[in-house]
Image (cartoon, rainbow, N blue to C red):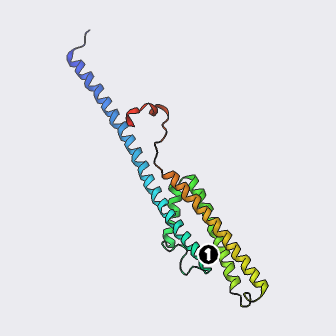
Amino acid sequence: MSLQPVEATLIAASVSAVVSTFAVIVTHLLTRKRDRMHRIWDRRADAYVEVVRSARTMATGRRDVLREKELPSGSLDSGSDQRTMLLTEARLDLFGTEEVKALHQVRLECFKSYVIALIEWRDMSIIPNAQKEPAGQRDIARKWAMVERRIAEFDAADDALVEAIRRETRFRKPKRQGWSRLAFWRD
């Protein structure tokens, strides 16, 4: 029994339809994965921009505290309110990498230590006779030295966090694994 031209045409059309459908499905899945990765990256980048902005704003405030030896007159992060800070924390928690989240947690601990040291120094320096007595002056100087140490720790934590974000945002080709290593035409 030989193959008739009509049968050959139907077989070829069927095979072509199956291959075309398969190609469309694969293309759709790959495009959807790439789009999802881009959306995640956009959200991650938004969180990172806010974290870096906050780090720079707060660093300026810390330098002012060191220079003037006075408490900041306004917010420690003047460019942000409580809602924005909480939203940034949520975005970072959802979209940030583990390294950046860990460094941000260290930064938050340094922030808490800095605020506590600053409050202790302020409380000591507003005691009525503390600035006149030698023991009070020593206590105030000791508290101020603690503020300076906390600022140095906070600066180091900020620098480490910003550097980790910079490393992550440098665009480089991802290493391919498996069969995708053979896809030389994508380069």
Dot 1: within a 10 Å radius of its alpha carbon, few (fewer than 14), some, or many (20 or more) residues? Answer: some
Question: Quick one: which residue is furthest to the front in this view?
Answer: 67
Which quadrant holds residue 102?
bottom right
Quarter occupied by the N terminus = top left
Q: What type is the residue that disc 1 sits on?
A: Leu
Question: Quick one: which residue is furthest to the right in this view?
Answer: 135
Secondary element at image label 1? helix
Q: Residue at x 72, y 78 (%)?
A: 141
Which quadrant holds residue 145?
bottom right
Q: From the viewer's perspective, is 35 left or right of 59?
A: left
Position of residue 171 measured from the top left corner of the image (x, y, whole percent):
45, 48
Question: Quick one: which residue is furthest to the top in this view?
Answer: 1
Q: In the figure, 82 relative to 29: above or below?
A: below
**Residue receiving disc 1:** 66
Callout count: 1
Q: Residue at x 33, y 37 (%)?
A: 24
Question: Quick one: which residue is furthest to the left in this view?
Answer: 6
Q: From the viewer's perspective, is 109 left or right of 2?
A: right
Q: In the figure, 87 relative to 131: above or below?
A: above
Q: From the viewer's perspective, is 13 left or right of 170?
A: left
Q: From the viewer's perspective, is 182 left or right of 92?
A: left
Which quadrant holds residue 7?
top left
Position of residue 111 measured from the top left corner of the image (x, y, whole percent):
62, 68
Quarter occupied by the C terminus = top left
Q: In the figure, 91 relative to 64: above or below?
A: above
Q: Residue at x 52, y 62 (%)?
A: 90
Q: Nearer the viewer, residue 69 or 36?
A: 69
Position of residue 174 measured from the top left corner of the image (x, y, whole percent):
47, 42
